Image (spheres, helix red, strand yellow):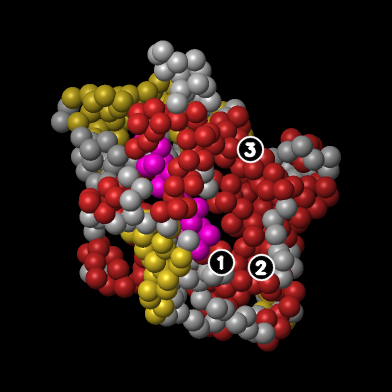
Amino acid sequence: MQITEMNNDGLKRTLKVTVGQTELGERFNQKIDEIKGRVQLKGFRKGKVPIAHIKKLYGRSVMAEVLEQTVRETSSKAITDRNERPAMQPDIDLPKDEGEIEKVISGEADLAYSMSFEVLPEIAIADLSKLQLEQLVVEVADEAIDEVLADLVKRGTTYETEEGRVAADGDKVTIDFVGKIDGEPFPGGDGKGVEVVLGRGGFIPGFEEGMVGLKAGDEKVVTATFPEAYQAEHLAGKEAQFDVIVAQVGAPKLPEIDDEFAKTLGMESVDKLKDTIKEQLSQEYQQGARMKIKRELLDELEKAHEFELPASLVDSEFDSIWAQLEDSMKRENKSFADEDKTEEEARAQYRKLAERRVRLGLVIGEIGDKNKIQVTQDELRSALVEQARQYPGQEKFVYEYYEKTPGALAQLRAPLFEDKVVDFVLEQAKPTEKSVSKEELLKALDEASEPGA
């Protein structure tokens, strides 16, 4: 095999690989020897078919297989021998002249092909200890615990029927109703024994408001209008009249915050319930702070590393982003005009996003490689189990998907690897801590989240 460099321009490489007739002949004969013991032809015992006869019958197809295997093996060897790091799978350009190919297949000419690819750039990792990062720390305030308790109490609300009670916001009314448009009932517009909590906004505008002031036994025609964006297009924007009969009115009764209430939530006491709430809130704050500093860290890594990007990687990433965007816009029936931008402006925006992702992906990969950061089999297994848990009853199909789908495990490994690299960088950077309130954390998160980033 002979390798000739045809192009070396920046990250672009083009190599010419030549495999001589002699080597091709040796590969061909070796392949014939491999199959001769398996060939069965009428008039010959198995394994006793003459080599010349096998070559006459199968020589062309065997040589085609040899050429395919030769290109695969020699292209890989060419990259290895030159210590190249291709950004993507090389493009192989075989001879296009039929006469030339025919000579190669018949063993009368050398095999010569070219392979084009981009290499990964050399990346000088910045001094990670000099990254300026800030770790937000939020203490769980008593008020935050009280807010969660109040929400749990609200969810635990029961309703007691009171004879003669006049319905008000917050009450639960039980009704029978028939809806009509232009005097005609419409499908799905009736119900019996339907419970409605007034003021929650669970029904179309005007419906709940129309029952305020009613009591058990009252009848009323309530007028309400379906929203313009209502999911049932034949009802969207139309005014309807509902013949309503009130069966009963229930007054809300909030549970007392005591040990009995805590037990209904699986806790042994109020103190235990508060401790659990505090722990959960603390975890939420930590996750939020982690999201914020990770975004800040990625921004700093992007600023600290400037190098040429392989166009093939950027194009591939952009195509993936753009396909997802087009699919999303199609589902939501939106256009670029709805976003107050042109398609050219959107392409420029998402091209920058693709460049950011490729740059950060290469930097993170380089940091991981140089510091021997790896995802262990146990970590990958745990992630797979966690993924399967998200689909109760379908765990077997999830495992089979990751087992049989090429690249699926790599997609599962990628975020684990990234998080381990982020942890490593944080250890080197030693972020300064800053105590903030929950509101300040939420504001920081909001400011850090840019569309499409």
Residue drawn at the location 77% of the way across and 50% of the way down: 276
SS type, badge 3: helix
The residues bearing labels 1 and 3 have C-alpha atoms spaced at a distance of 45 Å
Estimate the x, y position of residue 311 in percent, counting from the top left: 39, 71
Pointer 1 residue: 81
**Label 3: how many Cα within 10 Å (few below 14, some 14–19, many 20+):** few
In the image: residue 7, left or right of residue 347: right
Front: mark 2 or 3? 2
Q: Earlier in the sequence, mark 2 or mark 3?
A: 2
Pointer 2 residue: 368
SS type, badge 1: helix
Name above or below for residue 314 compared with residue 94: below
SS type, badge 2: helix
Name above or below for residue 79 compared with residue 44: below
**Is residue 430 visible to us here?**
yes
Front: mark 1 or 3? 1
Q: Are marks 1 and 3 in contact (CB under 8 Å)?
A: no
Of residues 314 and 312, which is closer to you in this image?
Answer: 312
Front: mark 1 or 2? 1
Estimate the x, y position of residue 225 in percent, counting from the top left: 26, 42
**Label 2: how many Cα within 10 Å (few below 14, some 14–19, many 20+):** some
The residues bearing labels 2 and 3 have C-alpha atoms spaced at a distance of 29 Å
The residues bearing labels 1 and 2 have C-alpha atoms spaced at a distance of 24 Å
Pointer 3 residue: 389
